[in-house]
Amino acid sequence: MANKKNKVKFGLTNVHYAKIKDWVTDASGANLTPVYVDPVRLPGAVSISIDANGENENFYADDIVYYVISNNSGYEGDLEIALIPTDFSTDILGEILDSNGVLVERNDDEVSQFALLFEFTGDKRKIRHVLYCCSASRPATEGQTTEDSKEVKTETISIKASALPNGLVKAKTCESTDASTYDGWYKNVYTPAVGTASKTTVKA
């Protein structure tokens, strides 16, 4: 992929989510690494807009910036899709599909954390991303009467992406990504090579 360098990016496609179904824990019972289910496609992606949380802070000594403290608090923003699938509502938002096929929301629904995978189209190669530990809020419910022309009403999910206990927040492909990793991006949640992320690596 070394000869396929992007100059620009545009578009959004191939949005997937992978629910965290369990955690590998240490002797004390503290969560260490997540165990993901296989990624599931989230169709109808319209847009994603996520902002970085956390700002660097300067520590001054000897009349200079002596040390820069990096505060990476993950990302926060919105994912707009055509219509939230029932699978996402039950898998992630904790809603219940009853015996009559009705989707039921309760005030004690337990939401699940998940990895969010997606890609932007580039002029040479699509750039594939993964946010390792996301949570989603319930979407608003809205609609309007049909007039002379029809306007599609999309649904927006607020996404908050935080760091895993081992420090991992996000990963993305680039021109040096090997073909097998790139082609298998949506088969399971990517595990960083040992030593590149932290002493503890994600077990997909």
Image (cartoon, helix red, strand yellow):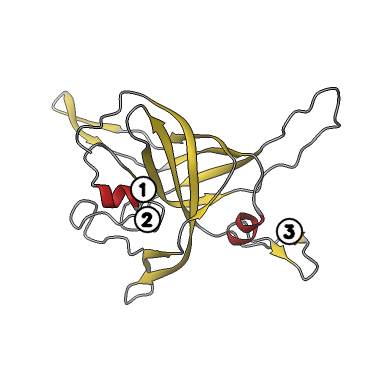
Amino acid on which the number 3 mark rests in the picture: Glu
Label 1 crowd bin: few (<14), some (14–19), many (20+), radius 10 Å: many
Image quarter of residue 22: bottom left
| Residue 117 position in % (x across, y down) | 44, 47
Local secondary structure at mark 2? loop
| Residue 51 position in % (x across, y down) | 45, 34
Local secondary structure at mark 1? loop
Amino acid on which the number 2 mark rests in the picture: Leu
Amino acid on which the number 1 mark rests in the picture: Val
Residue 55 is left or right of residue 81, and the answer is left
From the image, tell me which residue sits under label 2: 164
Q: Residue at x 73, y 61 (%)?
A: 106
Disc 3 or 2, which lies upstream in sequence? Answer: 3
Disc 3 or 1, which lies upstream in sequence? Answer: 3
Q: Nearer the viewer, residue 47 or 64?
A: 47
* Image position of 198 with respect to 50: above or below: below
Q: Which of 172 and 60 is in front in this view?
A: 172
Instruction: Kindly report which numbered mark, 3 or 2, lies closer to the viewer in this rendering.
Output: 3
Quadrant where the image shows the N terminus: top left
From the image, tell me which residue sits under label 1: 169
Label 2 crowd bin: few (<14), some (14–19), many (20+), radius 10 Å: many
Query: Looking at the rendered structure, which numbered label has been put on residue 105?
Result: 3
Q: Are marks 2 and 1 in contact (CB under 8 Å)?
A: yes
